[in-house]
Amino acid sequence: MFRLGRNRALASAFAAPKTSPAPRLPSFAQQQRRALSIHEYISADLLKQYGIDVPKGAVAKSAAEAEAVAKSIGSDDMVIKAQVLAGGRGKGTFDNGLKGGVRVIYSPTEAKMFAEQMIGHKLITKQTGAQGRLCNSVYICERKFARREFYLAVLMDRGSQGPVIVSSSQGGMDIEGVAKENPDAINTTYIDINVGVTDEMARDIAVKLGFSEQCVDDAVKTIQNLYKIFLEKDATQIEINPLSETSDHKVMCMDAKFNFDDNAEFRQKEAFEWRDTTQEDADEVRAAESGLNFIKLDGDIGCLVNGAGLAMATMDIIKLNGGQPANFLDVGGGATPAAIKEAFELITSDPKVTAIFVNIFGGIVRCDAIAHGLINTVKSLDLKIPIIARLQGTNMEEAHRLINDSGMKIFSIDDLQNAAEKAVQLSKVVKMARDIDVGVEFTLGI
């Protein structure tokens, strides 16, 4: 049900030590870890800066630009790729019916034709969900023919607490499928962060992959340069699929996926200027701008909590009582009235939400101040769905009194289990009321 970042999925599938696997964090904890992802054309430019070969190509943001780029490449054998941050583009479908976000083209005219059908339309793939993602540009590059195709990724591995290189001779295909069906085809090389990728290590990887003898030296340089990017740019993932040996015996990265550590934004200003927020959930972008940690989930009980640990416990207890959380929302230590209002607006923007569970420990901000903010927000937004508030900490008794005397439809409950039970119960009642088109206030008897 819950989304998981591709780099963490790869790391857990291929790179976990066989002897003592690291304990996995709950899915909610993994959810709040974010990693900047960049478009393929930017990845190609970055690879070139580090002396790594990629097919000749450029980005186009209009049909006219696509035609001009195709002319500049000077080849009648090219590929046009929709620039959407999602896997499975080649098998995706656009909202206008066009099949495939990656197409072989043979002329500038075809580049213009496909660009017109891709740019400004949403591409739906196995990773985007039914809503798809908007394609704002296309990447047009020379089509190169490979004698051999390999898979190579540099990842951070939680188990070994360091980088690893995951490689396979079976490149150019769904690597998760390869790992499942033929795990022996996956090789994992652990890297000492203080030593790096030595010549011997890189040569061993290149030989195991199956590069021909005349390409091994170039493959060694490519592997070391990929690790250099990984280290210097604070990457969490560099995935090359396929890493190819071309028909003219060149080592070339045909496709690239990069992720960068959000915690390194302060020293990777250039990389974070490459961020494309149109490829992200608009509510999550809005939340980040307000200093909130917000991630949409698939349930119907909205959660407003301060602190990641308490947020995970809250969602766990909702599930234990038969409910489904609609979001992860951590307002942090300063649960100010302004933050509470912004959080409520984000939660209630999801039409699936049928109840809101507020679970806040008032320490830095007192419970009575939180209660005032909560009451004012419910008034200003004219909320009709039930709200369950569990406020613990400084001045909690006063907060409880304020909520009970407010006349608002807020249920103030001290016990966590009782509060969770009430949230699930009221959520079910509201869903039933919506199904039979009866007013929520009437159904709840409030």
Image: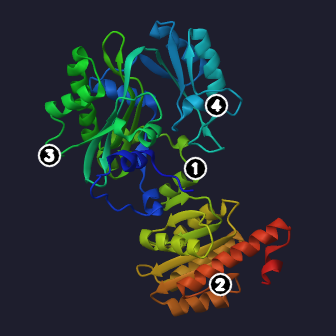
Disc 4 and disc 2: Cα gap in Å? 46 Å
| Residue for point 68% across, 26% down | 98
Q: Amino acid at mark 2?
A: Phe
Disc 2 and disc 1: Cα gap in Å? 30 Å
Q: Give x and y (percent) for residue 408.
A: 70, 82
From the viewer's perspective, tell me whether residue 220 is left or right of residue 104.
left
Tell me if residue 322 comes above or below residue 70 in the rendering.
below
Q: Which residue is mark 4?
A: 120
Sooner in the amino-acid sequence: mark 2 or mark 1: 1
Q: Amino acid at mark 3?
A: Asn
Q: Which residue is mark 1?
A: 282
Q: Are marks 2 and 1 in contact (CB under 8 Å)?
A: no
Q: Are marks 2 and 3 in contact (CB under 8 Å)?
A: no
Query: Of 415 and 316, which appears nearest the observer?
Result: 316
From the viewer's perspective, tell me whether residue 269 is left or right of residue 141.
left
Quarter of the image where one finds residue 52: top left
Sooner in the amino-acid sequence: mark 4 or mark 1: 4
Q: Secondary structure at mark 3?
A: loop
Disc 3 and disc 4: Cα gap in Å? 46 Å
Disc 3 and disc 1: Cα gap in Å? 40 Å
Q: Secondary structure at mark 1?
A: helix
Q: Which residue is mark 3?
A: 194
Label 3 crowd (10 A; few <14 / some 14-19 / many >=20): few
